[in-house]
Image: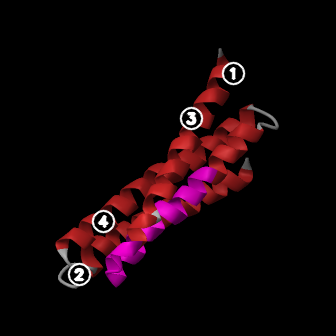
């Protein structure tokens, strides 16, 4: 529980800082399309940092939920793979990194499906 509250909080702070950097630090330095990629990465980063916080809160109510813990780890992996690939692509211009992005997106999807399964089983 505490770990995902910590990870979620740190990732919220990072997503805000990185979003601000993209809005102010990259303007005029990279192509608009790359700024849009950066912004997409920051947006999904923030959403999934909130997701990690939700996992932490739910873990305080649900003891020993392996699926919920896996959901949290998949959200973190998704941030690294999805948002991270977009951040690196934006600053380097290496568009081949876009091949990694869908893997992070899949991690996000599976994370939310696992959370839905846990919610259905625990709260129905």
Disc 1 to disc 3, C-alpha distance: 12 Å
Disc 4 to disc 1, C-alpha distance: 37 Å
Q: Which mark is residue 37?
A: 4
First reached walking from the N terminus: tag 3 or tag 4: 4
Q: Secondary structure at mark 2?
A: loop
Query: Quick one: 114 or 28, which is closer to the camera?
Result: 114
Give the image location of residue 26, x and y in percent.
27, 79
Q: Residues within 10 Å of mark 2 (few under 14, many from 20)?
A: some
Is residue 30 placed above or below 85 in the rendered structure? below
- The residue that mark 3 highlights is 113
First reached walking from the N terminus: tag 1 or tag 2: 2
What segment is highlighted magenta in the picture? 74-96
First reached walking from the N terminus: tag 4 or tag 2: 2
Q: Which mark is residue 30?
A: 2
Residue 54 forms part of the magenta stretch: no
Query: Quick one: 11 or 100, which is closer to the camera?
Result: 100
Residue 89 forms part of the magenta stretch: yes
Disc 3 to disc 4, C-alpha distance: 25 Å
Name which residue lies at 63% across and 28% down: 117
Disc 1 to disc 2, C-alpha distance: 47 Å
Disc 4 to disc 2, C-alpha distance: 11 Å
Q: Secondary structure at mark 3?
A: helix
């Amino acid at each position: 529980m505490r770990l995902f509250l910590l990870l979620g909080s740190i990732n919220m702070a990072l997503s805000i800082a990185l979003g601000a950097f993209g809005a102010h630090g990259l303007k005029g330095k990279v192509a608009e399309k790359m700024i849009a990629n950066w912004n997409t990465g920051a947006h999904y980063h923030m959403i999934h940092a909130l997701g990690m916080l939700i996992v932490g809160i739910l873990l305080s109510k649900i003891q020993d939920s392996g699926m919920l813990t896996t959901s949290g780890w998949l959200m973190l992996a998704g941030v690294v793979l999805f948002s991270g690939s977009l951040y690196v692509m934006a600053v380097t211009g290496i568009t081949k990194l876009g091949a990694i992005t869908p893997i992070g997106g899949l991690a996000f999807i599976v994370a939310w499906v696992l959370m839905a399964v846990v919610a259905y089983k625990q709260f129905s």
